[in-house]
Image (cartoon, coloured by chain):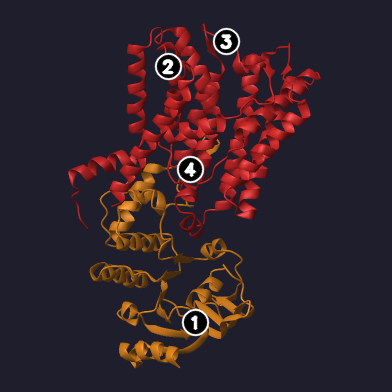
């Protein structure tokens, strides 16, 4: 498999049990280049387990994972991040008591070297954070503003902007819009589209097809740890997908 | 996004961003109050005494501040202070070179801090409990080893002078050490990636981990810092008194936490500043000396600190609550 041709992410035959609970059974999951995939399923379907295996939080019991055609097995989210996989969790997107630019650069440079110590370049951090966010259409009052006074949508937007800026290849969004107003959710979806336009792939995890339908290229549905199927957006309506999620739960 | 903030919200927002403003106001109020009501308060002797007390407490409190910002407590720091001071005293009495004794005693403090940190990180037991245990353990060891008797030392050295010698009347060298620590630790906290990680670890451990901060490492390093500075304060104090008793340092952990909180550091982690703690320890020092000079029995000192502490916490949490709403 040549590296350029290979899909961005390929998870093959993944299984994972926690004690007696079989969280995932022989699941295949693929994400193409510059593709937005909606990962759907009801609570407990195995969506988060699958993502946590991909990002190195859990090792799989069996199965193989390929990223850009290379076999990988991350032992921590930090390793996944280093390869360009950024995960934005619903409630863990940002640190509330810190300001926007400090959040933006958390665990990152820029630092300037003074003598033998690396100091943060606070001015540059503020400037870059503000500039990058406004480039992708996110207006902030001040990069020094604390995250605690921002709305949920603004927080998600900043996380997405950060992933774009730091040259991430894959953005994983965990229920990014489920606690947002319709207006805010629409904005976040715009940023997802913008991220795709800039070459990123996105995994959009949700239990509600209507949250992801406008932006997704493809859907993967899980139920009780088993994959129900992959569906191209051109082939299915949101109603059919919703039916599949609910139907497989009822079955 | 809305561009305008209501004015009350804007005011509380400003106060919330800089809780040190509250601490500064309190500091000025206490200072002016004692200047008016306490005779001899504005004398060199009194002010230098306050500074000496504040410096020794402050060396402990700045370490505690780092730890509290990252969301943990260290109740054992008073026992560490005693252990390091005693170690230095016993080594000095055994004619070990003072520089070597200093390094060994500091190493011991750091080691106890490391142990605290590893216990907290590995067991996931709240640090309040872990360090309550180690506080009792090391105090017990100290009492057992010394049989409860104080240790006095009649030698002196350049090193002891450098740590806490007198200068300019009643001032002690410890004030310089504390001043240097305030500057260095302020830079580390506000101007380095490590400092960013400290805030993130306390403010949102989950988000911090997701963003690539090694939360466990930050906590362990801060426990080591707290132990190191607790030990340093012990040796500084020993250099001033030339003696140490096995109960030395007990209670200082709570005063240090109180000073940090008065200075705007959150008990729940995620926010705090070294400058705030500086104001906090100066306030504690002023109250200790000022009350006596104002004619109140010395017993009232703790009661007064308690009241100030509660007022400080109310102001901090209420303001935060108003902004969060």
The quarter holding residue B84 reads top right
In this rendering, would A84 be left or right of A125? right
Residue topped by disc 1: A30
Q: Are marks 4 and 3 on the same chain?
A: yes
- Closer to the observer: label 2 or label 4? 2
- Please tell me which residue is depicted at 73% across the width and 11% down the height of the picture: B154
Q: Find residue B133 and report its horizontal and vertical position in percent.
A: 65, 43
**Crowding at label 2, few (<14), some or many (≥20) Cα neighbours within 10 Å?**
many
Of the residues under marks 4 and 3, which one precedes in the sequence?
4
Marks 3 and 2: in contact by CB < 8 Å?
A: no
- Closer to the observer: label 1 or label 4? 4
In this rendering, would B185 be left or right of A131? right
Marks 2 and 1: in contact by CB < 8 Å?
A: no
In this rendering, would B26 be left or right of B249? left
- Closer to the observer: label 1 or label 2? 2
Element class at badge 3: strand
Residue topped by disc 4: B69
Residue topped by disc 2: B291
Mark 1–mark 4 distance (CA, rounded to whole Å): 42 Å
Mark 2–mark 3 distance (CA, rounded to whole Å): 25 Å
| Residue B25, visible in the rendered structure | yes
Residue B166 is labelled as: 3
- Which chain does tag 4 point to? B
- The chain displayed orange equals A
- The image shows residue B259, relative to residue A190, as above or below, that is above
Element class at badge 4: helix
| Residue A1, visible in the rendered structure | no
| Quarter in which the N terminus of chain B is drawn | bottom left
- Please tell me which residue is depicted at 43% across the width and 42% down the height of the picture: B266
Q: Find residue A46 and report its horizontal and vertical position in percent.
A: 50, 79
- Which chain does tag 1 point to? A
Mark 3–mark 1 distance (CA, rounded to whole Å): 72 Å
């Amino acid at each position: 498999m040549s590296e350029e041709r290979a899909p961005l992410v390929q998870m093959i035959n993944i299984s994972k049990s926690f004690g007696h609970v079989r969280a995932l059974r022989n699941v295949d999951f693929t994400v193409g280049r510059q593709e937005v995939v909606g990962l759907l399923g009801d609570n407990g379907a195995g969506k988060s387990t699958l993502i946590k295996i991909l990002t190195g939080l859990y090792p799989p019991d069996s199965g193989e994972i390929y990223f850009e055609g290379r076999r990988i097995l991350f032992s921590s989210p930090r390793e996944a991040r280093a390869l360009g996989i950024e995960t934005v969790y619903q409630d863990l997107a940002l640190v509330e008591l810190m300001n926007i630019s400090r959040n933006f650069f958390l665990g990152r440079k820029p630092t300037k070297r003074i003598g033998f110590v690396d100091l943060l370049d606070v001015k540059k951090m503020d400037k870059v954070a503000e500039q990058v966010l406004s480039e992708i259409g996110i207006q902030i009052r001040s990069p020094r503003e604390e995250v605690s006074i921002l709305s949920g949508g603004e927080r998600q937007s900043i996380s997405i902007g950060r992933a774009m800026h730091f040259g991430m290849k894959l953005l994983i969004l965990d229920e990014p819009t489920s606690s947002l107003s319709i207006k805010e959710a629409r904005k976040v979806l715009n940023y997802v589209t913008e991220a795709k336009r800039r070459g990123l792939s996105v995994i959009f995890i949700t239990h509600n097809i209507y949250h992801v339908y406008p932006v997704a290229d493809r859907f993967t549905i899980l139920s009780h740890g088993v994959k129900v199927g992959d569906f191209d957006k051109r082939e299915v309506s949101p109603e059919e997908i919703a039916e599949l999620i609910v139907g497989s739960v009822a079955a | 996004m809305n561009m305008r903030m209501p004015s009350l919200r804007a005011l509380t927002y400003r106060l919330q961003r800089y809780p040190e403003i509250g601490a500064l106001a309190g500091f000025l109020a206490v200072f002016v109050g004692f200047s008016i009501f306490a005779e001899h308060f504005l004398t060199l002797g009194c002010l230098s005494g306050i500074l000496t007390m504040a410096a020794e407490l402050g060396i402990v409190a700045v370490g505690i501040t780092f730890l509290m910002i990252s969301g943990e407590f260290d109740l054992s720091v008073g026992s560490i202070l005693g252990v390091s001071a005693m170690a230095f005293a016993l080594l000095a009495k055994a004619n070990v070179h003072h520089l070597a004794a200093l390094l060994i005693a500091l190493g011991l403090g750091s080691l106890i801090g490391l142990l605290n940190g590893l216990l907290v990180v590995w067991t996931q037991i709240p640090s309040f409990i872990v360090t309550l245990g180690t506080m009792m353990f090391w105090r017990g060891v100290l009492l057992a080893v010394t049989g409860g008797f104080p240790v006095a030392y009649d030698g002196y050295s350049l090193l002891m002078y450098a740590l806490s010698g007198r200068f300019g009347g009643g001032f002690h060298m410890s004030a310089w050490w504390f001043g240097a620590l305030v500057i260095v630790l302020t830079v580390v906290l506000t101007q380095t990636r490590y400092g960013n990680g400290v805030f993130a670890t306390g403010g949102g451990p989950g988000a911090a981990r997701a963003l690539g901060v090694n939360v466990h490492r930050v906590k362990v390093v801060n426990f080591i810092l707290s132990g190191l500075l607790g030990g340093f304060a012990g040796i500084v104090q020993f250099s001033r008194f030339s003696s140490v008793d096995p109960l030395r340092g007990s209670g200082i952990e709570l005063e240090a936490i109180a000073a940090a909180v008065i200075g705007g550091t959150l008990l729940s982690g995620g926010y705090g500043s070294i400058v705030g703690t500086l104001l906090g320890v100066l306030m504690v020092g002023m109250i200790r000396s000022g009350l006596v000079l104002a004619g109140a029995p010395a017993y009232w000192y703790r009661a007064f600190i308690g009241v100030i502490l509660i007022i400080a916490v109310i102001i901090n949490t209420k303001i935060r609550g108003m902004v969060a709403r």
